[in-house]
Image (cartoon, helix red, strand yellow):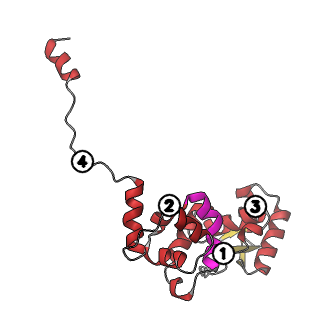
Amino acid sequence: MTQSDDRQKSTPQSAPQSAPPMNLRRQWDALSKKVFWDRTVPVDKWLKGVAAAHRSYLPDSILVMTPAQFIRFYGIQEFKRDWPRLRASLPESALGCAPRFDLAWSQAVGGGWNLAPTPDFYSLPEKRRMFLATVARTPGKSIYEIAKNIGLQYRRAHDHAVRLVGDGKIRSVDTVENGRRKKILYPAYQKPVTV
């Protein structure tokens, strides 16, 4: 190893200088002023207000914040747990922005874009929630395919499908494929693909 090689190794590479990222507090202060019209609301007070579905904190936040900003300060686990309840308490004026948050919730909870945040979602039995999330993530699959995907016996999967169809959470379309009848499942608000 030559002396010039040694110098190259010990000389730090010059990296482009960038401004240090704004700390979280400064980010919240800027966002808070944007949401609450130049008024800084402490993040702890905002968290309590949003969690309680406060008549101004929740709708104002939904109208102005992006889902990423809301989740960053509210917390992903809290958002996954609370969004169905919070959405149900939104006033009419904020419902136009709710679908962006619905998509973020659907992606966080079910891994897809079609899961509707119903207030009773977490009161469903765990396997039924899993079945519903799988139908939402992979619409157009048969009961058998869903059962195989999540490791359920066909009979149990069929029971979940019948119950979820009855509750209006999913729809089934009867088809015949290779001479066999199949029930193809879709989220309740998604139209089936016609072949």
Q: Is residue 141 visible?
A: yes
Q: Is residue 18 left or right of residue 152?
A: left
Callout 2 secondary element: helix
**Other residues around mark 4 within 10 Å, as few (<14) / some (14–19) / many (≥20):** few
**Other residues around mark 3 within 10 Å, as few (<14) / some (14–19) / many (≥20):** many
- Could you say where residue 50 lies in the image, as x and y percent from the top left? 57, 70
Residue 147 badge = 3
Identify the residue under disc 2: 73
Identify the residue under disc 4: 18
Q: Which residue is nearer to you in this view: 156 or 101? A: 101
Amino acid residing under circle 1:
Tyr
Cα–Cα gap, marks 1 and 4: 48 Å
Q: Earlier in the sequence, mark 3 or mark 4?
A: 4
Identify the residue under disc 1: 186
Q: Is residue 138 visible?
A: no
The residue shown at (65%, 64%) is 81
Q: Which residue is nearer to you in this view: 55 or 190? A: 55
**Other residues around mark 2 within 10 Å, as few (<14) / some (14–19) / many (≥20):** some
Cα–Cα gap, marks 3 and 4: 51 Å
Label 4 vs label 2, nearer the camera? 2
Q: Earlier in the sequence, mark 1 or mark 3?
A: 3
- Could you say where residue 44 lies in the image, as x and y percent from the top left? 53, 62
